[in-house]
Amino acid sequence: MSPVHPIEEAATAWAVIDENGTLVRWSEGAHRLLGYAPQEVEGHPAADLLDPTGATAPTEPTGNRWDGVLPLRHRDGRVLSVWLLAHRRQPEGGGWLVVTPLEGEEPRPPDDPLIRAVLTQSPCAMAIYDERLRLYGINDAMAEVIGLPEDRIRGLRISEIGGKRESEELEEDMRAVLVSGEGRDVETYMRTGGEDRAHAWLARIAPLTDADGRVRGVCLAAHDFTEQYKARERLQLVNEASVRIGSTLDVTRTAQELADVCVPVLADFVSVDLLDPPEHGGEPDSELPTAPVTLRRAAHRSVNPGSPEAVVTLGEVDVYPAASPQADSLIAGRTIVVPDANNTMEEWLAWDERRRERVAKLGVHATMSVPIRARGQTLGVAVLTRFRQPGPFTSDDVLLAEEVTARAAVCIDNARRFSRERQTALALQRSLLPQSLPRTAAMDAASRYLPAARAGVGGDWFDVIPLSGLRVAMVVGDVVGHGIQASATMGRLRTAVRTLADIDLAPDELLTHLDDLVVRLSEEAGAEGTTGEVGATCLYAVYDPLSRRCTLARAGHPPPYIAPPDGPPRQLELPAGPPLGLGGLPFESVEFELREGTVLALYTNGLIESRGRELDVGHQLLSRALEQSSHSLEWACHAILQALLPVGGAQDDVALLLARTRGLAPSQVATWDIPADPALVAPIRKQVADQLDVRGLSEATFTAELVVSELVTNAIRYGEPPIRLRLIHDAATLIFEVSDSSHTAPHLRRAKTYDEGGRGLLLVAQLTQRWGSRHTPDGKTIWAELTLVGED
């Protein structure tokens, strides 16, 4: 059976006539209309139904459609004037489908003077639809709005005239009025006619009733407010641009947001090309560029998924000569609209074969180039292209594109400035952090520093500082804020910590001095009438491999974790201490014994804190990662960051320092108690020399005897009993320590020609690599280090 045309199902009366004029199908609606049963007319000429009294046959139809009013003979002898609509059947290509949308009535034909007068005299666009919602007639105003003549659309549903989705919604509204008999106001945007024109309608749908009050159709009175609609659409686009563009401080993301906003409202394809920033920093050139222009593709967007129209890939650099839309707009410093891309850009397309083929294939007919400028600087150009939208770019389109691009330009410039400042701050931050960790006999160490993914570089830092007696200090800190200022403050604090560590202050005393420094920095920051906002947290620890004890103090910083060699990780309980910068509040040190092979984890809060995660969960993840990372410290750092940080990067700066403790064997330490008698210095020198011979260090005996002699003599002469000498050595260093109960620290001075003393410490300083003094609870210790590696 042949497929049924949609009109066959919708119309009340219909029939099918083949090419020879023979009726081949007769519907029940036709039976009711003219009284003939199907078996009475099927197979007979259709002309037999015409009124025999002077009726003339209809004119031969041209094309695939015909409509008109014909006098048809009823079975009972009556003559009915019936308006018919004939369509050539598809897809067979032969025969005709003849329908009438008026059921069993003698309708007033569309050219009835009364109906035509009502339609013509109406000041607005009007259309009348019958009970089957088929077009009965329209006036000239509606024909102009629709863009189609009446004879081409009469008898069609509105869904067969306009765009499918919008017209189907309007047809539902018309059906609701037909059923309820109550009018309604609707607003729709519909694409109609062969000219592919889009119009916004503000319509009133009113029921049409007969003398008995029955609804026999609907009247659609429409007001074309396309211009107002487009103006509202442009305002909406500007508002959308202000919301969508600049959501991040990322240049390429912002450029992509510009392209996304413009498609498909303004153009079918948009490309955003940017000038590369100066190689050595600074501001872009404020002068307009000259041809040829080198640009980098930052973003593009098409109405077709995947942007198949793009000739240049994202991130690719291309050169644009004069006559290209990009170069012309940048050189002129204004928007340039090309209404006919094929003819106007002939020179440009001839220069680039790829673009010429792409333009011809797509049917590009209009381009608009808008320079991207902000704060007097040229940043790039946005090129808008049309190949699907039929209309050219109007003056309103130009204003809209310039408005949106201007907003995007400021966001792109902000992103560039942020990126430049971020790179500067990151370079400063990395230059102020340790480039490598020192190798010490007390521990193995590994570290990581990661800047925040979006918030900018902060002031997190870490350090490992070798101290006297093979001890080592570890520090992790976090300066409040982000940016260059935070990095600079971090550098000052790190330098201060190293300076204070060199004089061997206890952890709580060191934090007290550091707190004073932060208070002074805050006062300096507020010197110009602003509020000082310098603040920081810090954790400072000192580990002694001889006693295997670690002393720690913290200033508002997260406490560290320890992972014993044969036990689960746990967090150390330390007095919190106030953050640095509050001033006047005490800090407290706590001492722990750490077994050899214990891993100590120091970190900043960016590692465990996350907006989408509870703090306890962060601690659990860190503990689990430490437990599973019992081998390489470098691998452990990597595993911890993978376990705790999100895929997109840290939300805050992260500093992580891992250290595995070592211990010194008793055979590496020798101690002598020395009476306060200068005559016993020589025997002490002899005992030290014997000890070095036992340890295979006889090549250092001469230097060691001189150093021991000077240090012990000074302690006997200027110090107070008890006096003790300690000799420590590892594979590379020989350390001499002389302790006494006096708190007076020695100082290095240059002796005059006739002075009898004052040359001892100068001699020690020249013979050793490092020397110094440190205060202890019982007095002081003078120490000196002699490097063994490389000595012959």
Image (cartoon, rainbow, N blue to C red):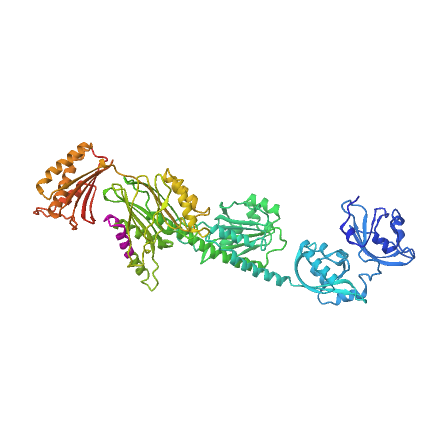
Q: Is residue 168 magenta?
A: no
In the rendered image, which quarter is residue 666 located in?
A: top left
Q: How many marks?
A: 0
- Image quadrant in which the N terminus is located: top right
Q: Is residue 502 magenta?
A: yes
Picture coordinates of residue 625 (x, y %)? 41, 42
Specify whether residue 718 is in view.
yes
- Image quadrant in which the C terminus is located: top left
Picture coordinates of residue 126 (x, y %)? 73, 63
In the rendered structure, the answer to whether residue 737 lies left or right of residue 623 reads left
Q: Nearer the viewer, residue 309 or 537?
A: 537
Picture coordinates of residue 201 (x, y %)? 67, 61
Q: Nearer the viewer, residue 690 or 425?
A: 690
Q: Magenta: predominant secondary structure element?
A: helix
Specify whether residue 139 is in view.
no
In the rendered structure, the answer to whether residue 757 lies left or right of residue 697 reads left
In the rendered structure, the answer to whether residue 380 lies left or right of residue 746 reads right
In the rendered structure, the answer to whether residue 142 lies left or right of residue 511 reads right
Q: Nearer the viewer, residue 561 or 640?
A: 561
The residues colored magenta run 501-516
In the rendered image, which quarter is residue 678 located in?
A: top left
80 lies above or below 768: below
